[in-house]
Image (cartoon, rainbow, N blue to C red):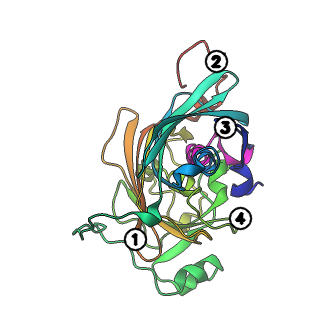
Amino acid sequence: MSTFEKAAEVRQLSSHTYAADFPEDWCIGSVPHGGYITAVFLRVARTHFATTLRAQSQPHPLTCHLEFLRRTQVGPATFTVADVKLGRQTSVIHATLRQQGRDEVVGYVGHTDLRRETGISLPTAWALQPPAVPVGEGSLARLKAGEEEEDEGWAELEKMPFAEFRKASNRVRFFFPRRGQLAKGLTDEWMCLRSGERWTNDSIGFAMDMWPQIIETYSPEGDPYEIEKRGNERPSLGSMWYPTLLLNLDIKKVLPEEGVDFLFQRIQAKRIQNGRFDLESILMDEEGDIIALSHHVVFAVSAARNLAKRSDGSRQSKM
């Protein structure tokens, strides 16, 4: 079982080319997890701004837009970077992920120095609605230590449904409201990395794509992610795959260099129709500050699509 640090490792091949190797235990079925791929893009960008573009002095990710053109796969991958805009306040690169001669994911990553930001700041009336279930003082540390009875509102789901297929979900420990989610189409969670590593600015991309599958919470048998079901219930929908087509990431706050143990996330779908749906993610720290926002466009298809034989690259299609 590889750690995040090892799985997201990138090697600089030239001033604008980087290599990575995607391990099997960070996959959904045969396809590397989309959030993990996002995290590797962020790692490539950070490495590029620390080496080739170090004169910019812009170490922090600000925005990320990715288009998932085709299924990625386990094994070596190459990232080619183009410097699109080099600015005083922000700079933007374009990156292309290639495997076996195919362009599989393309995107833009913007960087800045979040610690030197200046400008107008104003309070807003925004708040989570409905409010999240409160977590008691010191409860997160006790939950991590396995002392679930110490918190009335939250408990750990030790195994996610279809964990054998969704191997990447085993990299995270999930804590859900003990009495169930607050509304249909909405899920709240606290999470930490199972390896004991801490969440960092690199792993934000993985965090923001790691959650219960909202469509499965509509199962006639009830929400399979409820704590008392212990991840053993298989939704009557059967084994599904939810490939991301597009991901937009807006980073609001830099995490400390040493990282943090826990992150809170709320995920909500506004419309689920014809096998396609949206997901909005709000990522927050233990103090309730927004770390990042993301928006995903997602398909809902049979898991067989995930495992199907790959094309030779002549067909210009993701799946």
Task: Tell which circle, 3 or 1, labels the residue nearer the N-terminal end.
Answer: 3
Task: Identify the secondary structure beneath mark 1.
Answer: loop
User: Hey, what amino acid is under mark 4?
Assistant: Ser
Marks 3 and 4, how far apart at CA: 32 Å
User: Which range of residues does the magenta coloring cover?
Assistant: 24-42
Task: Identify the secondary structure beneath mark 4.
Answer: loop
- Name the spot of residue 288 as percent of width and height, x first: 40, 74
**Which mark is in front, 1 or 4?**
1
Per the rendering, the mark at residue 15 is 3
User: Hey, what amino acid is under mark 3?
Assistant: Ser
Task: Tell which circle, 1 or 2, labels the residue nearer the N-terminal end.
Answer: 1
Instruction: Please name the residue that numbered disc 1 is placed on.
Output: 289
Per the rendering, the mark at residue 238 is none
Q: Residue at x 53, y 52 (%)?
A: 205
Name the foreground residue: 211 vs 11. 11
Instruction: Please name the residue that numbered disc 2 is placed on.
Output: 311
Task: Tell which circle, 4 or 2, labels the residue nearer the N-terminal end.
Answer: 4
On whether residue 116 falls in the magenta region, the answer is: no
Marks 2 and 3, how far apart at CA: 31 Å
The residue most toward the right is 1
Which quadrant does the N terminus fall into? Answer: bottom right
Q: Residue at x 53, y 57 (%)?
A: 204
Task: Tell which circle, 1 or 4, labels the residue nearer the N-terminal end.
Answer: 4
Name the foreground residue: 302 vs 97. 97
Q: Residue at x 67, y 65 (%)?
A: 194
**Which mark is in front, 3 or 1?**
3
Instruction: Please name the residue that numbered disc 4 is placed on.
Output: 195
The residue most toward the left is 125
Marks 3 and 1, how far apart at CA: 36 Å
- Name the spot of residue 155 as percent of width and height, x first: 54, 74
The image quadrant that residue 23 belongs to is top right
